[in-house]
Image: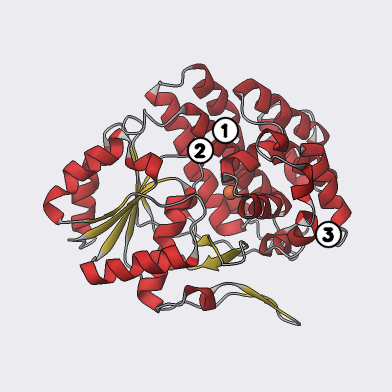
């Protein structure tokens, strides 16, 4: 965990313009014009598509004859992405507008990659090769620009990675710097009808990006500064939002912390906690925010003793006496903001956890974990604690 010796590091930043203010959504036509977009594909989920923001967006884009798809699922499949890309091609779209959370962002990225590189998408996924480890194809063709209006605190809109479900229910992971949103419009007023519960659960996901970024093997001095600040901001902003769920200023603070967390994730990748969350989410069709909320204290309890030094600056910022107490602070936060605390709240049968620990060992994110995990029992213990 010495960063390669003599402080050596690699850090990645991407080209994103972030506009954060009440009413930022009104900037959408101008931002699309400056990107040269004349006919966008507009993606939303069934939920985000019914929001006031989506209605405002339809009004703002009415003259552009956009192609609308308002039923992006929680875990999109390869077939769904390829079908959307095919209709986008027929419609002659030249840009993508994503309104929603991580699921909508991931679909937007996947459609952009499919349009540029061609179907089938599966051949472009990161794969594990014997003797070479994880291999991520270099995707060189230019991608259509994506403009995102985030409705949750995942931060997915500013990361190059995304996951799409394959036919066997596992999640294929992709990475392409060209699909990071070119513009992000953070508008706390436009998303006032998003339930605070969604922002709080996905805020736990954003918080997890910052925590894992602190000890990822791919961390850098730059990502660590962002991660420490992100942890501090989430610890302040989530309880504040819980106490005043319709306060636009407090929503803005959560969304800005999410942007920080996305910048951390974009450079550091994620570790053991997210490996568990990805397998649970894809296998049991659970929302990413829910699994993050439930798993985080238990994953931190497992990892923290090995990375006390890396966690200590963030602990100091939030007034936690040492990394050993960080897991308890996470549990306290769960209670304080009323997010889910037990897998059994949404997992009907304990038996459905069988085999998950084994699958987690082979997740891409385990390569970023600060120490090697070979024993599925270590992961099963986290799942057991979270049950
Ligand atoms: Fe995440």
Marks 1 and 3, the one that precedes in the sequence: 1
Name the residue located 71 percent from the left edge and 81 percent from the top edge: 132
Q: Which residue is mark 1?
A: 234
In front: label 3 or label 2: 3
Return the residue nearer the eye: 16 or 196. 196
Res. 89 in view: yes
Say which element carries label 1.
helix
CA gap, disc 3 to disc 2?
30 Å
Neighbourhood count class around disc 3 (C-alpha, 10 Å): few under 14, some 14–19, many 20 upward:
some
Name the residue located 22 percent from the left edge and 55 percent from the top edge: 32
Image height of 214 relative to 190, above or below: below
Q: Are marks 2 and 1 in contact (CB under 8 Å)?
A: yes
Task: Please give left or right for residue 92 compared with residue 349 in the image.
Answer: left
Name the residue located 85 percent from the left edge and 45 percent from the top edge: 381
Q: Which residue is mark 3?
A: 373
Residue 231 coordinates in the image, percent (x, y): 61, 37
Marks 2 and 1, the one that precedes in the sequence: 1
Residue 382 coordinates in the image, percent (x, y): 80, 44
Viewport quadrant of the N terminus: bottom right
Marks 3 and 2, the one that precedes in the sequence: 2
Q: Which residue is mark 2?
A: 257
Q: Quadrant of residue 330?
A: top right
Say which element carries label 2.
helix
């Amino acid at each position: 965990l010495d960063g390669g010796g003599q402080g050596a590091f690699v850090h990645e930043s991407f080209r994103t313009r972030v506009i954060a203010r009440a009413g930022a959504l009104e900037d959408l036509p101008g931002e699309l014009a400056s990107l040269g977009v004349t006919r966008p594909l507009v993606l939303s989920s069934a939920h985000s598509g019914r929001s006031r923001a989506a209605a405002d967006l339809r009004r703002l884009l009415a003259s552009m004859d956009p192609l609308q798809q308002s039923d992006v699922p929680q875990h999109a499949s390869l077939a769904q992405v390829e079908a959307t890309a095919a209709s986008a091609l027929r419609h002659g779209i030249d840009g993508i507008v994503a309104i929603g959370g991580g699921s909508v962002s991931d679909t937007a990225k996947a459609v952009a990659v499919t349009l540029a590189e061609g179907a089938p998408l599966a051949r472009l996924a990161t794969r594990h090769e014997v003797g070479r480890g994880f291999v991520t194809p270099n995707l060189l063709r230019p991608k259509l620009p994506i403009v995102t209006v985030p409705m949750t605190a995942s931060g997915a809109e500013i990361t190059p990675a995304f996951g799409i479900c394959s036919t066997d229910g596992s999640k294929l992971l992709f990475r392409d710097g060209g699909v990071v949103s070119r513009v992000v419009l953070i508008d706390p007023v436009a998303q006032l009808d998003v339930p605070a519960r969604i922002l709080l659960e996905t805020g736990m996901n954003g918080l997890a990006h910052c925590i894992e970024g602190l000890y990822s093997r791919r961390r850098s001095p730059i990502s660590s500064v962002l991660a420490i600040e992100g942890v501090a901001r989430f610890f302040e902003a989530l309880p504040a939002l819980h106490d005043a769920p319709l306060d636009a200023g407090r929503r803005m603070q959560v969304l800005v912390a999410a942007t920080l967390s996305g910048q951390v994730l974009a450079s550091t990748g994620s570790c053991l906690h997210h490996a568990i969350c990805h397998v649970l989410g894809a296998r049991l069709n659970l929302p990413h925010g829910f699994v993050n909320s439930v798993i985080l204290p238990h994953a931190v309890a497992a990892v923290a003793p090995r990375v006390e030094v890396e966690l200590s600056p963030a602990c100091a910022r939030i007034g936690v006496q040492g990394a050993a107490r960080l897991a308890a602070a996470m549990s306290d936060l769960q209670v304080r903001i009323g997010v889910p605390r037990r897998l059994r709240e949404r997992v009907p049968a304990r038996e459905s956890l069988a085999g998950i620990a084994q699958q987690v060992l082979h997740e891409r994110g385990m390569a970023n974990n600060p120490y090697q995990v070979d024993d599925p029992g270590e992961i099963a213990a986290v799942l057991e604690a979270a049950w």
